[in-house]
Amino acid sequence: MSDRTRLERRYRRLLWAYPKDYRARRGDEIVGTYLELAGADRRRPSPADAVDLLRGGLRQHLRAAGPDVVAGAHLAAVLALGTAVALAAIWLVYFELGPREPLPIPLQFGPFWSLGAVPWIAWLAVGLVAVVAPRRWVRIGIGAAIVLTGAVVPASVLTATIRPPLFVLLPQIALGLVALALPARPTAVARVVPLAGAVLFGALPAALGVYRPFAPLTYWNHFDVPAGAALLLGVVAVLAAVTGGVLGGGGAARGGGVWTMLMLAPPVGLLATQSLATTYLTPSGQFNASSTALLAVSVAVTVLTTGVLGLALVLRTRRHGHRPAPPAPR
C-alpha cells in the first residue's frame, strides 16, 4: 500500500464525523480536496485538518438535526461566553487583586493571588474582541483562553505557585467549548453580552466596593461564586427553553430554547460540582468536599449531561433525516 493510499484512508476515517448521507454525497469531494492540499511527503492528516474535519462534521450534524438545534447552539454559545467572561472578571477583581493574607514569596504570582490571573485576563480580552471582531478571531481567542485555562494546572506544579481549584477551572473550559458555536453573524446584543457581563459583575462592583466585605482570606474562598453562577445560568437556560430565546442571531426557531438548555447543562453541572459534592458526598459537619468526591461528581455530571445531549441529537437527527423532502418551489 502506497503512502498516498494510507493518507487517503486516514482522511476517510475522519469522515465518520459527518452524517452518513452527507458522506455518501460529498465524501469523495472532501477527501480529494484535502489530498490536493496535502504535501507530497504527508503521511497522515495534520492536526489542523483533523480539527477542521471534526468541526465540519459537528456542524453538519447540527444542520441535519434542524434549524432549531442550530439556533439553540447559537444562543447557548452567546450565554456561555457571557458567563465565562463575567466569571473571569469576578475571579480577577475579587480574588486576584483583592485583599489577601500575606503569602510566601515563591507562592505568589507577582501582584496577583494566583496563576489564574493569566487565563482570566485572556477571557476578558475575548470579551472585548467579541464586540468588534469577526467570529473567526473570536473563536481563536476562545481557543487560546481554553488552552491557557487548562495550562494553569501543569504550570502551577512546575512553578510551585498557587492556582485556582479545579471546580473553578473545569467549568470555565466547558463554557469555552460551548462558546465555540457562536453564530456567524451575531446580533448587536449578542456581541455586547460578554463585555456587559464583565462590567456588571467585575468592574462595576469593584468601583462600588461591593466585594470588599467578602475579601478572600484563604485560597479556598471560591465556594459560593460557581454555585451562584450555576443557578443564574440555569435559570436563564430554562427561561430560554420557555421563551425560545432571541440572542442567537437571526431569530431562534421554535424549540431552540430547549436545545439551549441541553447544551448549557454540562457547564451548569460543573459549576455546581462543589455544592453537589459538599451536599451529597461530604460527611455532616465537614465544610470542604474531598478531591475524590469532587472528581466523582465532575465525572458523573459530565457523563450524564453530555450523554443526554448526545442521545437527543442522535434521535433528532434520525427523525429529521427521515422527513420527506419539501416540494420544489413553483
Image (cartoon, rainbow, N blue to C red):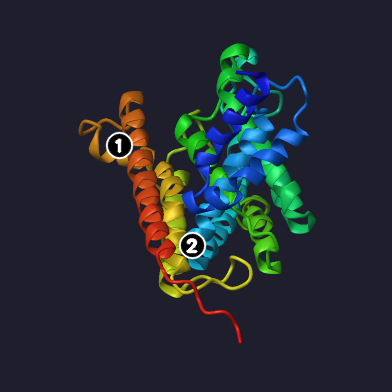
Secondary structure at badge 1 equals helix
Q: Nearer the viewer, residue 166 or 17?
A: 17
Q: Nearer the viewer, residue 208 or 112?
A: 112
Hey, which residue is sitting farthest front in the picture?
1
Name the residue at 50% across, 59% down: 64
Q: Amino acid at mark 2?
A: Val
Secondary structure at badge 2 equals helix
Whichever of callouts 2 and 1 sits on the residue coming sooner in the sequence is 2
Q: Is residue 148 above or below residue 123?
A: above
Q: Amino acid at mark 1?
A: Thr
Hey, which residue is sitting farthest left in the picture?
284
- The residue that disc 1 covers is 278
Kindly tell me whether residue 15 is visible in this rendering.
Answer: yes
Q: Is residue 247 above or below residue 41?
A: below
- The residue that disc 2 covers is 69
Quadrant where the image shows the C terminus: bottom right
| 45 sits to left or right of 219 | right
Say how many tags the image has.
Answer: 2
Circle 2 packing at 10 Å, graded few (<14), some (14-19), many (20+), is many
Q: Looking at the picture, how far across and down is residue 18, in whole percent?
A: 52, 46
Q: Looking at the picture, how far across and down is residue 188, in whole percent?
A: 71, 68
Q: CA distance from mark 2 to mark 1?
A: 34 Å
